[in-house]
Image (cartoon, grey):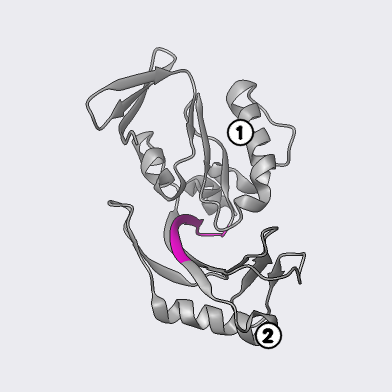
Amino acid sequence: GARVVGLERSGGLWRVALADGTHETAPVVVNAAGAWGPRIARMAGETIPVRFSAFMMLLTSPLPHFVTPVVGAVGRPLSFKQLASGHVMIGGGHKGVGDLDTGRVVLDIDRAAYSAKTALELFPVLAGSELVHIWAGIEGVATDDRPVIGPGRTEGLVHAFGFSGHGFAIARAVGTMVAQLALAGPTNLPIGPFDPARFDPARVAAT
């Protein structure tokens, strides 16, 4: 609940200005601000091209167990998984409308209905179940659909945002990466494909 409005480094410390007029200092800042990550990066003088989407999810009433893996579809947008409780989560990239300034989202009921119809056609076992919850969340999406994880250009800054829909699946590895980067410096995990520096104009021009 503490909105960051300024970020600068001096004397080996980051000074973080908050909207309520107070300040915090720390030797290391982890920018894990999700879709708002690019705004924090800009405060540190970095431009990282991450847009945002308000992805919608649907949750059904509980059903007897019928599927174990997370299921996707070819030719139709679908992400489908059954929870231990029996509830089924249906996604697949259908979007509502989000506002970064307010954090509010508005559902697109037509798209949500299409998502439910797709799931029902592929999994007739859903017939008779009810949709008990529909929601949308604002997610950062990098221009190359890969997360942004790695050190910033300024000492003591670590980025971990723009997960582009992959966050839950790689959360444990990301936690290890970020802890190593923040506390020890390098990480022993393969972080190269996620390096924020891949967006540097000089590197892009050289490829």
Q: Residue at x 55, y 52 (%)?
A: 163
Secondary structure under the numbered disc 1 in the rendered image: helix
- Where residue 70 appears, as percent x and y from the top left, is 71, 65
Q: Is residue 24 above or below residue 69?
A: above
Q: Name the side, left or right, on which 128 lies relative to 33.
A: right
Identify which residue, 176 or 62, lies in the foreground: 62
- Where residue 53 appears, as percent x and y from the top left, is 43, 62
Residue 71 included in the magenta stretch of the image: no
In this rendering, does residue 112 appear at all?
yes
Q: Is residue 20 above or below residue 78?
A: above
Q: Residue at x 65, y 69 (%)?
A: 80
User: Count the marks: how many?
Assistant: 2
Picture quadrant where residue 44 is located: top left
Secondary structure, magenta segment, majority class: strand
Identify which residue, 197 or 87, lies in the foreground: 87
Picture quadrant where residue 75 is located: bottom right
Residues shaded magenta: 134-145
Task: Return the residue at label 1.
Answer: 178
Task: Return the residue at label 2.
Answer: 124
As measured in the structure, the alpha-carbon distance from the residue carrying label 1 to the one carrying label 2 is 42 Å
Secondary structure under the numbered disc 2 in the rendered image: helix
At label 1, the amino acid type is Val
Q: Earlier in the sequence, mark 1 or mark 2?
A: 2
At label 2, the amino acid type is Pro
- Where residue 167 appears, as percent x and y from the top left, is 59, 51
